[in-house]
Amino acid sequence: MEMPIPNPAIIARKARVVERLQGVLPVDAVIFDERETRAYECDALTAYRCPPMVAVLPSTTQEVSDVLRICFEEGVPVVPRGSGTSLAGGALPTADCVILGVARMNDVIETDYENRIIRVQTGRTNLSVTGAVEENGFFYAPDPSSQLACAIAGNIAMNSGGAHCLKYGVTTNNLMGVKMVLMDGEIVDVGGGHLDAGGLDLLGLICGSEGQLGVVTEATLRILHKPEGARPVLIGFDDNEVAGACVSDIIKAGVLPVAIEFMDRPCIEATEAFAKAGYPMCEALLIVEVEGSDAEIDHQLALISDIARRHNPVELRQSKSSEESAKIWLGRKSAFGAMGQINDYMCLDGTIPVSSLPHVLKRIGEMSDHYGLKVGNVFHAGDGNMHPLILFDANKPGDLELCEEFGAEILKLCVEVGGCLTGEHGVGIEKRDLMHVQYAADDLDAQMGVKDVFDPAWLLNPAKVFPLDASESRRTIKLAAE
Amino acid sequence: MGITSEEALVDAVKAARGPLAVRGGGTRGVPAAGDVLSVAGLNGITLYEPGSLTVVAQAGTPVAEIEAALAKENQRLAFEPMDHRGLLGTVGEPTIGGVMAANVSGPRRISVGAARDFLLGVRFVDGRGAVVKNGGRVMKNVTGYDLVKLMAGSYGTLGVLSEVSLKVLPRPETQATLVLHGLDDDAGIAALAQALGSPFEVTGAAHSPAAQKTTLRIEGFETSVAYRLGRLRELLATTGAEMDVQTTKASEDMWHQTRDVAAFQNQEGDIWRVSCKPSDGPKLAAGSGAQEWFYDWAGGLIWLRAAPGHDLRGALGSFVGHATLVRADVQTKARLGMFHPESTGVARLTAGLRAQFDPKSIFNAGLMERAA
């Protein structure tokens, strides 16, 4: 994956930039020693690494504003960072950049049960938002699988989803307001405790902009009361196509499960060997979870089971207790770990229309044979958000490149059938150069035009999201002017 | 202009020499100067996959046509778009493009989200005449910036929608409404907050001071609706209010009336719509100088009727939220502005976006711009 050549003129100014940053931040909040900046050299896309020139850890919105103003005046690129759990390289530094980490900003500012909102600093982790309200029976709905570690800042940047978004939506559907600092240091408030924008929906635009429009320091989030209970049913099929048809029928029947998860045979085999959850050995396995009171759950699970029986399942197991639920979820939750036991893997998250599921799985199988790399498929079937895990050997020369090529082919297939490159991980650097597959030049220009408004000098996370050739003229204006 | 294709739309935008009044069915009372640019001729559902919960339609497709197609599959537009014709006295056919351009959502907004949350993808023509697509027809999509949300609620000022793709939802088996009688504004809003803070999945929460009725809608399978109504009754027993239940058709009618602001349809005066923090509602309404009001969205949406020309926004002063002037004569709309003024920082960004998408300022010129 290509990154722009670091600007030597900026690196030459390092001492001055550090001195100015030290003027507005506590001593321990400016990290510039090369042994220490290495801690920020990558995010969860670990195949790509580059220590930043400087890393800063501000504690307040004002400090964030001071840092951005200085970087703006000095013409230094800034890469915002939440907890560094991006799978797409969203927080990958360049050698001439300042990493702005929000990890020290993790306070709860306000909880308001009457209006069902919580206001937090964005360095707070996703799970600890729920942690702050759960003793009163409330929770924050978006639940990316990295929720123990990932920060709200990163959730907003990537518009993170999770297993339960079929019912509760993704970050953008649960975000009510932000305090954001623009690249020139200006602090802007958008939205708040009320619903919907009075003018243009800037909130919707900011969410998912991958840290390219501003640094969000505070967020107002919608919280909900927890359901009375939740239980899944596990359904096994000897045919992917039949499993896909069953998903469609469940959705059409008017039951809205909170989650519909899908695993294929390679994935079932790997997780059984690893977690021993007692899954049936079959071609496809669905886990469908519903919520409500005990009686409501029983009613919905009975409906789902009736639909499933019409598709001749090889296994149908309704959970009747929390122990049985935990056992059904055990394999699914250890799927990534299980695949990781076998080999290194690359995880993609292209999304497809649910109706294309059988076709896409068949094509992925054929491609797997062609590339000689194994793939396990585990994904959120209710919304078509795939997660093919391609196994490769990082120590074998050429295997990573082969795997990336295979991955790109899968994502092109997702677009071809009417889907998209990424459903919840974001573009980052990983899918940046594939954006041409999904978008025409005018489509990309319209998006880049938005960045021109928020960050005219293209200093915020500049080498992400847009193909380098498409963004080059915008990114290099600043260099030419120097 | 009889535009029936996206190409013709491009040609019309490129040929424009002055401002264009962008229009779908023309039912939502949006004042705009210039030649009318109507997309009503861009008509038809292009794709409907009930099993994927998605529908794609041209922007001028009547909402009624989409709702009819969905009803056949027992699905619906869950955000429950308001029909403005009764309130505004407009005629014509509301279009799906108009719904999205104005981000029109009804009472169910509090539980399922707004129109913008159901918009999965758009095609539009910008002020240069370029066709832009964004999003797609899948429910989870973070590929690039979300211009879909930006277009929703932009009232045609950034571009003219040519096609939209939407998420739809199953129509529940049944519905019922719990009605609490005799509560004042404060007690009514507090009861709604209590109900929404429960696990019983309320999909409508309104309070009418005139009728002294506080209403809570429950939808789903019949046994589940009965169970949750019972639990809500227990929960709200502390209010001391008398309660009864309206079922099926009576419940549906009640929420159509709330959605379409039926209470003010044949009444004189200006109509304002205030979005606020629900708990701020009663105080804001009481200080607004309005003659009459009612609350939807558990108090977070207040519909107010005021004397013609009354500056209700001015009376409210500074608060978390915004006030939109929905119905008034042309002079009042021009004097007070339809939309709430924005803070300096936000106004600078929105002006910048307008200049990017519509550099010649031809689309509904000046409609939304009002810096504080």
Image: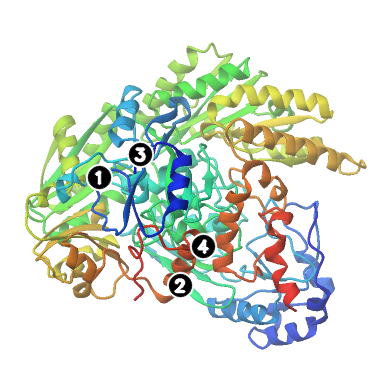
Q: Amino acid under label 3?
A: Gly
Crowding at label 4, few (<14), some or many (≥20) Cα neighbours within 10 Å? many
User: Which label belongs to residue B82?
Assistant: 1
Q: CA distance from mark 2 to mark 3?
A: 32 Å
User: Alpha-carbon distance for marks 3 and 4?
Assistant: 25 Å
Which secondary structure lies at badge 3? loop
Residue B92 placement, left or right of B159 = left
Give the percent coordinates (x, y) of residue A239: 62, 16
Identity, as a three-letter code, of the amino acid under mark 1 = Met
Residue sitting at x 72%, y 77%:
A481
Residue A80 percent across, percent down from the top left: 64, 66
| Disc number placed over residue B356 in the picture, else none | 4
| Color encoding of the figure | rainbow
The quadrant in which residue B294 appears is bottom left
Residue at 23% over, 70% down? B336
Q: Which of pointers 4 and 2 indicates the residue nearer the eye?
A: 4
Q: Position of residue A255 (x, y in %)?
A: 39, 28
The amino acid type, in three-letter code, at marker 4 is Gln
Callout 4: SS: helix
Secondary structure found at label 2: helix
Q: Earlier in the sequence, mark 2 or mark 3?
A: 3
Which is more N-terminal, label 1 or label 2?
Answer: 1
Q: Which residue is mark 2?
A: B348
- The residue tagged 3 is B60
* Residue B278 against residue B83 in the figure, above or below: below
